[in-house]
Image (cartoon, rainbow, N blue to C red):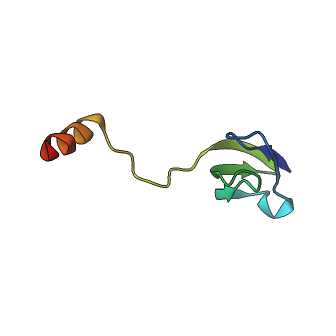
Amino acid sequence: MKLNCVSCGHAVDLRNSYDHYEGQVKCFACGTLLSIRTEDGQVRSVAYASSTPQISNSATQQATADFA
């Protein structure tokens, strides 16, 4: 089973060990961490893996105000 990296388009070969998998894989070409879900040997979802917590805009504005 193969999937295309959402960052660079490289075909990532997952082999049969990923037929039923939900987690992260790394693109061998560009190093992007991908969050994937597979079922029955089919890719169901591919997205960028979030390695850092998302900060809301209001939290960013407050942090900026604290340093001003």
Observer-nearest of 5 and 31: 31
Q: Is residue 4 left or right of residue 23?
A: right
Q: Position of residue 5 (x, y in %)?
A: 73, 44
Q: Residue 59, located in which quarter of the rendered image?
A: top left
Q: Which residue occupies 70% across, 58% down? A: 21
43 or 49, nearer to the observer: 49
58 to 2, vertically: above or below: above
User: How many numbered discs sit on the rendered protein?
Assistant: 0
Q: Position of residue 38 (x, y in %)?
A: 73, 50
Question: In the image as oriented, which residue stretches furthest toward the front?
Answer: 68
Residue occupying image coordinates x 64% and y 51%: 32
Q: Nearer the viewer, residue 3 or 64?
A: 64
Which residue is painted at 31% across and 39% down in the image? 56
Residue 63 point in image, percent of width and height: 20, 45
- Residue 45 sits in quarter: top right
The answer to whether residue 64 is above or below residue 39 is above
Q: Residue furthest bottom?
A: 17
